[in-house]
Image (cartoon, rainbow, N blue to C red):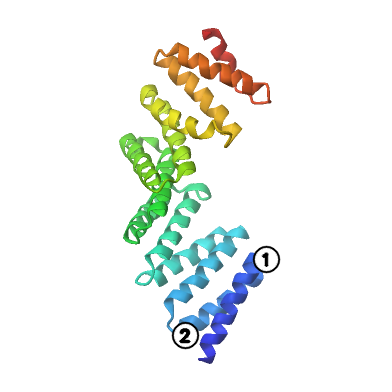
Amino acid sequence: MKEKDEAIKFLKLGKQEYKKRKYIACIRSLTYAEQLFAALNDKELEGECLIYIANAYIKLGQLDKGIKAYEEAIFKFEDKSTSKKGTCEYLLGLIFRDNKNNITKAKEYLARAINSFELDNNVEKQADTLRALALARVKNPRKFVEKKEEIIENFSDALKLFQSINAKEKTAVTSLELGEFLISLEKYGDALKYLEQAYNYYKSGKSEKILFTLRIDLIQSHLLVGNKNTALKYYKEAIEQSRNGYYSEKLEKFSRFF
């Protein structure tokens, strides 16, 4: 079909323009392709065009237009692709969390994305979204509406899924985040389990900055549960690392304990 060939040609062109960061040209090409696919009643390819259009608008800083395009894409994928639908819901959740500071909307879209990825059997994306949901709840300025147990559950469920697919870095990052959330609740003993897990990953040189943060958290938590000798071990490591330019006010305060 001539119309289908024309639509695919402009879809490919729009993708190439996106890769070259020609976002305005990309939007123009893909809007035309999307109109052709709409006339052909090809909702899946129409939705694919809309995802790239949304991405391009986000790159241009036009968030509201990007949000609108993602929402339109979700509608197109409704009965076609739970994976692509979930991706749009996930990205909308991040935009509302990080750019719009609308935690209610963020939670709504992330919860929908979890369901979509679960239906699609996409374990990693499901875990990514559970973690994103936990972080959205932590970030909520109206903290009194959030149940702390549910935040811990979101983090824990994400961890189990990451571990099930051996996603080591994501397991470590999530362990650190859960550990620090437990510190904020003054549950230092519970926090240690997750902080130690993260430490065991990062101590092999993965990230000196994160390792320094972990050492500070571990010193504090071990001191507060009475493990002074273990705290001293991490204190010595942190002091050594501080000679390479790493600094924390807490480290100076810890010196009076040793």
Could you tell me residue 227's position as x and y percent? 42, 14
Name the residue: 55% across, 81% down.
8
| Residue 244 seen in the figure | yes
Identified at 40% across, 70% down, the residue is 77
Identify the image quadrant of residue 207: top right
- Give 257 or 249, whichever is nearer the viewer: 257
Q: Is residue 20 left or right of residue 142?
A: right
Q: Which residue is mark 2?
A: 39
Q: Which mark is residue 178?
A: none
Secondary structure of the residue carrying tag 2 is helix
Would residue 249 be seen by someone viewing this image from the given angle?
no
State if disc 1 and disc 2 touch (CB < 8 Å).
Answer: no
- Specify few, some or many for label 2: CA neighbours under 10 Å numbering under 14, 14-19, or 20 or more: few
Q: Residue at x 60, y 32 (%)?
A: 208
* Badge 1 amino acid: Lys
Q: Is residue 47 left or right of residue 121?
A: right
Residue 132 spot, x, y in % from top left: 43, 46
Q: How far is mark 2 from mark 1, CA to CA?
A: 28 Å
Where is residue 88 shown, x and y percent of the image? 45, 61
Q: What amino acid does circle 2 point to? A: Ala
Mark 1: few/some/many CA within 10 Å (<14, 14-19, 20+): few
Q: Position of residue 187 (x, y in %)?
A: 37, 24
Mark with earlier residue (2, 1):
1
Front of the two marks 2 and 1: 1
- Residue in the image at 44% along x and 28% along y: 196
Q: Secondary structure at mark 1?
A: loop
In front of the other: 157 or 74: 157
For residue 163, above or below residue 257:
below
Residue linked to disc 1: 20
Which image quadrant is residue 32 in?
bottom right
